Amino acid sequence: MGTAWREREVFYADPLAKGALTMEIRPATEDHIEGIAAARLSNGPAHDDSGADAGYCRHLISDGQLMVALEAGRVLGFGGAIDVAGARLLSDLFVHRDVQGRGVGRQLLAAVMTGAEARYTFASNDPAALPLYARAGMLAWWPLLSMRGAAAALPMGGAAAVEASVADAVAYELAVTGHDRTSTYRYWAGRAQSRTVQVLRGAECIAVAAVHTGEGGTRVEHLVAQPADALAALAAVAALFESTHVHVYVPGCQRLSAALMERGFSIEETDIFMATSAEVVHPLVQVVHPGLG
């Protein structure tokens, strides 16, 4: 995946932009990771799974695409993407604050999305970003809700969670969605304080999840389940790790979002799902990682 980008370098100039830059757009390497972090942090504080996270960058380099815009060796910005079930997910697009508005983001987006007809992203509400993605053929469909609430508010529903191997999680998701997410589950499982989980009702597996734990709370990164089982699956995951709070990113079109609001979960922020087609996100993905699907 992304091999073609590793075999060539692309050069761009943007003479129509004010203060135009002559830049090189090329695949990122280990040598660019520090510059990528600087570009990301120039835009404000960053969380894990961002351009400021070296492990996340290495995952995109090895299993997806991570492109950088360079001028005289300096990283002006970066764009990351990963292919999921035949569609390309734009994971990140950040331009260093001191060169914004000079064509860098537009050219990074064009480079990282080249060859992908089906494409999507979870965009912030930045008024400059939304038109950029719309011009790239991605329309706004629904909000992705960052929600947090008390684990005690979740009904157990007769389910229990157990830690699972990457192979077991991959096999379940492949069986119910047709999507092979092996490389991403390996990444999630390899991070500190992260686990892959199966949720069982009796002997039947009803859900799989990637989970990050710490500071009294559980962040469910990714959850695949039937809609009727999603709430019980979250409760079981929280119980497994004895969590006080649960943090999830839930599509606003899923019944799960309303069920969580009814139980006192608050919406901390929203992203906008923008895509060439709403069907690029499988309906059984109840919790969506904004950068990795």
Image (spheres, grey):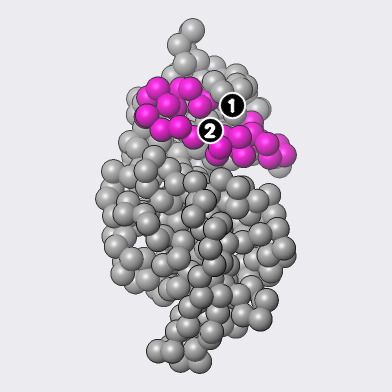
Q: Is residue 223 magenta?
A: no
Residue 54 in percent (x, y) is at 69, 54
Residue drawn at the location 53% of the way across and 86% of the way down: 21
Q: Is residue 191 magenta?
A: yes
Residue 96 in percent (x, y) is at 59, 75
- Residue 18 can be seen, yes or no: yes
Task: Give, as a single range, the part of the protein colored magenta.
Answer: 169-195
Q: Nearer the viewer, residue 257 or 128?
A: 128
Residue drawn at the location 50% of the way across and 92% of the way down: 19
- Residues at badges 2 and 1 in contact (C-beta under 8 Å)? yes
Q: Secondary structure at mark 2?
A: helix
Residue 65 in percent (x, y) is at 53, 54
Q: Nearer the viewer, residue 207 or 111?
A: 111
Q: Secondary structure at mark 1?
A: helix
**Mark 1 highlights which residue?**
166
Q: Earlier in the sequence, mark 2 or mark 1?
A: 1
Q: Nearer the viewer, residue 120 or 143?
A: 120
**Quarter of the image where one finds residue 180:** top left
Residue 38 in percent (x, y) is at 68, 70
Which residue type does callout 2 highlight?
A: Thr
**Mark 2 highlights which residue?**
182
Residue drawn at the location 40% of the way across and 61% of the way down: 114
**Quarter of the image where one finds residue 76:** bottom right
